[in-house]
Amino acid sequence: MWKGLLALGKVLEPLGAITSGSQFLEPDGLFPNHIPNPEDKTAMKAITKAVLDNKADLGIIFDTDVDRSAAVDSSGREFNRNRLIALMSAIILEEHPGTTIVTDSVTSDGLTTFIEKELGGKHHRFKRGYKNVIDEAIRLNSVGEEAHLAIETSGHGALKENHWLDDGAYLMVKLLNKLASARTSGLGSGSKVLTDMVEGLEEPAVAVELRLKIDQNHSDLKGGSFRDYGEAVLKQLENTVESNPKLLKAPVNYEGVRVSGYGGWFLLRLSLHDPVLPLNIEAPSNEDAVKLAHDVLNAVKEFTALDTSALTKFVGA
Ligand SMILES: O=P(O)(O)OC[C@H]1O[C@H](O)[C@H](O)[C@@H](O)[C@@H]1O
């Protein structure tokens, strides 16, 4: 948070920005206001409210060490998760036409269509983890595929021009540059220029993440590791998907099991750090999301060390 203060004092105010509506600037390790995470709904609600209450042009939110960020436009629309990636892709693809955008694995199908069909770039959906996406972008460049942006739905992002530093503040500076140049070239003030850049992005009606815990002390692990157990769950799901004509496994996928069906998709994968299988589902309606969840539940329900209660609740809802 102190870096956020630094950004306000050293960058925004000398540039003439009015920052008086800013909030929660006092560092407090107990995080009394909300979880310091730009993916968190309460955090985004707080910044959105501040933007609307203060009639601000733009809201900017960071995590504590400023490597994750998100923004809010003057109408209260969020630039986080897929929308932030879409916006950053639009900016980077103006500067580097045709370049590859590297993202994490939980990005939406709509984002791929937007990057490839609307912006003329290439979407390389890789693995979760900021280090994974950055290393992959560096690797692509080293084998002759140009990539300038590596970014996660978590709000972590890195640019080639910024030496691949995982730097949420730099992403926000790119947005501010865009605002400033739009104003100078008479394209109007305020954040509309940014909002217009993501206009063609299709967003799902339903997007959920359910995190299914593996009980490491459960006898069903038979003394094995939670990773082995998680892999067995994924294998079982993969086999079930292959025998279900309504489901289609993603032809290119770098982690977990990603599947399309009922107009939406799901991804079940192992968490990077925890004994957890995060399940992301996106669908055009709640009914379709429940159908996808149902198919996952049916495939994994025999794994007794896996806590499927969140999934059962979602299916029953
Ligand atoms: O795999 P998960 O449990 O969802 O966690 C994934 C996240 O882990 C850490 O927080 C990393 O810094 C992020 O880059 C990553 O996205």
Image: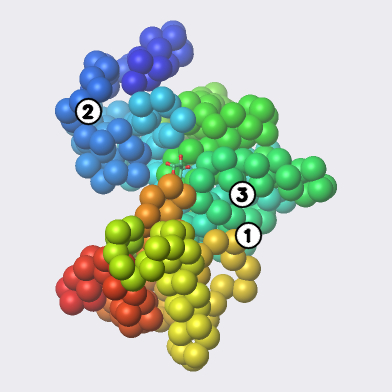
x and y percentages locating residue 64 in the rendered image = 36, 26
Residue shown at the point (43%, 54%) measured from the top left? 271
Q: How is the image coloured?
A: rainbow
**C-alpha distance separating marks 2 and 1:** 39 Å
Above/below status of 314 relative to 79: below
| Mark 3 Cα-neighbour bin, 10 Å: few <14, some 14–19, many ≥20 | many
x and y percentages locating residue 122 in the rendered image = 67, 56
Residue 31: numbered disc: 2
**C-alpha distance separating marks 3 and 1:** 12 Å
| Mark 2 Cα-neighbour bin, 10 Å: few <14, some 14–19, many ≥20 | few
Residue 193: numbered disc: none
Q: Which residue is farthest front?
A: 223
Of the four image quadrants, the one with ligand 1 is top left
Does residue 115 appear in this view?
A: no
**C-alpha distance separating marks 2 and 3:** 32 Å
Residue shown at the point (53%, 41%) measured from the top left? 130
Above/below status of 248 relative to 208: below
Foreground of the two, 304 or 234: 304
Above/below status of 220 relative to 239: above
| Mark 1 Cα-neighbour bin, 10 Å: few <14, some 14–19, many ≥20 | some
Residue 102: numbered disc: 3
First in residue order: circle 3 vs circle 1: 3
Report the quarter where the C terminus lies. bottom left
Foreground of the two, 202 or 308: 308
Q: Look at the numbered disc 1 and say if its residue's Cβ is closer than 8 Å to ligand 1.
A: no
Q: Which residue is mark 1?
A: 116
